[in-house]
Amino acid sequence: MPGLTPGREAGDLGVNRAAVRDDHPGMPIVPLRLDAAVDAVTLLPTRVHLLERITERAPTSADAPAALVLVGLLRRDDGRPLPGSDLDRIAGLLSRSTRGDDWLARSGPTEFAVLLDGAAADAETAAHRLVAAVAAAGVGGLTACAGIAGISPEASAGEVHRRAILCLTAARSVGGGRVLRYSGSRR
């Protein structure tokens, strides 16, 4: 059956991943761009835009605090990928559960990002609301966790995202419904 087979990394070409068609071995490598403007399933901005938005927001964060909340989905069943229709449903639910000034993006295969105005401590309330909304969505076996990191002029967008991912990973290891906020410093 024709399809795509994972290929080699094409890092020097500015492409994150490559693939070749297994039904036409002579065809050249086709780059698969991971920096699309909009996620094809949820129609939300992608991680690339998230990092740009954090970079734009960071210089003013000393005067007007902001935080990144990463909401990660957890499945209690067989662990197979969540169907696109369920991802779209969750994206709509998260969109309806955010405030007017909040900014929602898709950060990864099972992660959504929300940029919030306000301190990281205040973002915990919003994160708990978002996690509870996912649990109440009615998608069988689906729960969520969240990781929170404050945005600051001293931290790059990548570092803010790394801190939120660190907290999300720790929250996932504990179980559904957990919200953890980054409060340490890099050593």
Image (tube, grey):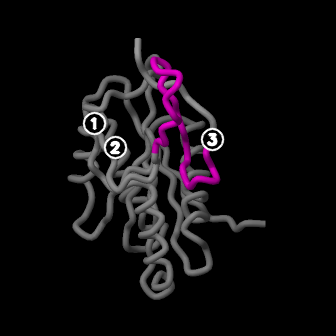
Q: Which residue is mark 2?
A: 132
- The x and y percentages for residue 148 are 50, 58
- At horizontal 63% and vertical 50% (from top left) the residue drawn is 11
Q: Residue furthest bottom?
A: 63
Q: Are marks 3 and 2 in contact (CB under 8 Å)?
A: no
Could you classify mark 2 by the number of other residues whose Cα lies within 10 Å: few (under 14), some (14-19), or many (20 or more)? some
Screen quadrant of the C terminus? bottom right
- The x and y percentages for residue 31 are 49, 42
82 vs 18, left or right, is left
Query: How far is mark 3 from mark 2, CA to CA?
Result: 39 Å
120 inside magenta stretch: no
Q: Which residue is mark 1?
A: 136
Q: Which residue is mark 3?
A: 9
Q: Amino acid at mark 2?
A: Ala
25 inside magenta stretch: yes
In what element is the residue under mark 1?
A: loop
Q: Nearer the viewer, residue 168 or 81?
A: 81
Q: Residue furthest top?
A: 1
82 vs 21, left or right, is left
Along the polypeptide, which appears first: circle 3 or circle 2?
A: 3
Q: Which dot, 1 or 3, sits closer to the camera?
A: 3
Query: How far is mark 1 from mark 3, CA to CA?
Result: 40 Å
- At horizontal 42% and vertical 21% (from top left) the residue drawn is 3
Please tell me in which quadrant of the rendered image residue 123 appears: bottom left
- At horizontal 29% and vertical 28% (from top left) the residue drawn is 139
Could you classify mark 1 by the number of other residues whose Cα lies within 10 Å: few (under 14), some (14-19), or many (20 or more)? few
Q: Are marks 2 and 1 in contact (CB under 8 Å)?
A: yes
